[in-house]
Amino acid sequence: MKLFKFQSSKTFSKRHIPRPVRNVLISAAILLILCVIAGLAYTWMMDGTATTIDPVKVSATTVPPPITPHKPAANANEGVSVEAITSPVSRGSEADVAIHTNPTSTCNIQVFYNYDIEKKQKPSTEPGLEDKVADDYGDATWTWTVTPMDTLGLGKVIVTCTYNKSMGVVQADLQVTK
């Protein structure tokens, strides 16, 4: 009587998929089938209840409501932020600084070219660097011309705003180039 001879596991290993890989493949196939079934069920259910929304008709005379500014409380803290600054700026060009603070705050700007804290420099007195009152939205801007004689290098712009008895300060770098 002849016994069946089983093949060794080495010959089966070429066709055998490791269990973790097989589990991942089976799970992915099941998830794919479930997603397709869920999509079909959703489409079938929503098809009967589909509604259309009429588009909003906009005419040339449609105007959005105006943005109304609000006045801060009398005891509001003062905050200042630089919204925009022209930097780098070359000699002979215009520089701009835009800040945001409380509406109707009084703001002072100081510009120091090639700033060095040790030198006790005096701020620039160029036209356009006068005190400003922030508008009803809290915005203030300054524009001035950097003269051809102003010092090259990294300078500072310091803006100080006061609202009632509260004060806020912000500073920004100003790079002056040829």
Image: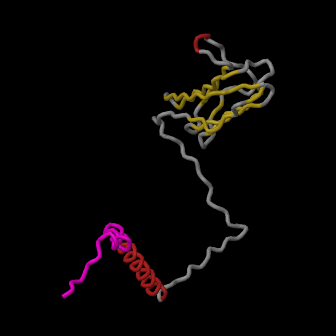
Q: Please tell me which residue is depicted at 51% across the width and 41% down the height of the picture.
A: 72
Indicate the quadrant containing the N terminus: top left, top right, bottom left or bottom right.
bottom left
Instruction: Tell me: 119 left or right of 89.
Output: left
Asked whether 144 or 112 is in front, the reply is 112
Res 169 → quadrant:
top right
Res 114 → quadrant:
top right
65 over 143 or under it: above or below = below
97 over 44 or under it: above or below = above
Question: Residue 103 appears at what percent x and percent y?
Answer: 57, 39
Asked whether 21 or 66 is in front, the reply is 21
User: Does 19 appear in magenta?
Assistant: yes
Q: Please tell me which residue is depicted at 60% across the width and 35% down the height of the picture.
A: 82
Res 18 → quadrant:
bottom left
Q: Residue furthest left?
A: 1
Question: Residue 42 appears at what percent x and percent y?
Answer: 44, 82
Q: Please tell me which residue is depicted at 60% across the width and 30% down the height of the picture.
A: 106
Q: Please tell me which residue is depicted at 29% across the width and 76% down the height of the picture.
A: 7
Question: Residue 35 appears at what percent x and percent y?
Answer: 42, 77
How many numbered marks are there?
A: 0
User: Does 79 appear in magenta?
Assistant: no
Instruction: Tell me: 70 left or right of 140.
Output: left
109 over 98 or under it: above or below = above
6 over 154 or under it: above or below = below
Q: How is the image coloured?
A: secondary structure
Indicate the quadrant containing the C terminus: top left, top right, bottom left or bottom right.
top right
Q: Residue furthest front?
A: 1
| Residue range (magenta) | 1-24
Instruction: Tell me: 117 left or right of 5.
Output: right
Question: Residue 48 appears at what percent x and percent y?
Answer: 47, 89
